[in-house]
Image (cartoon, rainbow, N blue to C red):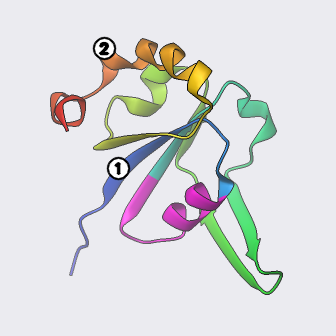
């Protein structure tokens, strides 16, 4: 049975926990829009309470919105409030369904 994959773009690198948790699931494909793509590896790993490790693979990492948001179903903003205005650059590249939810 094929799983429907939710395509998500995390905008900002503030929450590695969200990125790793979503990317570790078979039903998510996770892209990352960040101002510092060179600081990221394709695999994101975190420890929870020092015991459990969650690891996931990011599909695409880029500072170019066109590369990471054009085919996603959801864009999640994980950045400080003063940077939210900078995400307007991605709006023309969002699918209409994503844009309206």
Element assignment for label 2: helix
Q: Earlier in the sequence, mark 2 or mark 1?
A: 1
Left or right? Give the position of 85 relative to 28. right
Q: Is residue 94 magenta?
A: no
Of 13 and 82, nearer the camera is: 82
Residue 72 is left or right of residue 54, and the answer is left
Tell me if 41 is positioned left or right of 84 in this view: right
Vertical relation: 70 (above or below) 16 = above
Residue marked by disc 2: 92
Q: Which residue lies furthest to the bottom in this view?
A: 51
Residue visible at 23% across and 29% down? 99
Q: Quadrant of the C terminus?
A: top left
Counting other residues with Cα less than 10 Å from the Cα at mark 2, is it few (<14), some (14-19), or many (20 or more)? few
Which numbered tag is attached to residue 70?
none
The residue positioned 16% from the left and 28% from the top of the image is 96
Q: On the image, numbered disc 1 is attached to which residue?
A: 7
Region in magenta: 17-29
Q: How crowded is mark 1: few (under 14 residues within 10 Å), some or many (20 or more)?
A: some
Q: Circle 1 sits in a helix, a strand or a loop, which is it?
A: strand
- Contact between marks 2 and 1 (CB within 8 A): the answer is no
């Amino acid at each position: 049975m094929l799983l429907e994959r939710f395509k998500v773009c995390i905008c900002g690198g503030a929450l590695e926990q969200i990125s790793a948790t979503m990317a570790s699931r078979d039903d998510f494909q996770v892209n990352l829009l960040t101002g510092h793509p060179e600081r990221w590896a394709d695999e994101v790993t975190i420890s929870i309470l020092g015991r459990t490790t969650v690891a996931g693979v990011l599909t695409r990492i880029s500072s170019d919105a066109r590369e990471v948001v054009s085919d996603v179903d959801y864009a999640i903003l994980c950045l400080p409030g003063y940077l939210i205005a900078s995400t307007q650059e991605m709006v023309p590249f969002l699918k209409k369904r994503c844009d309206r939810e």
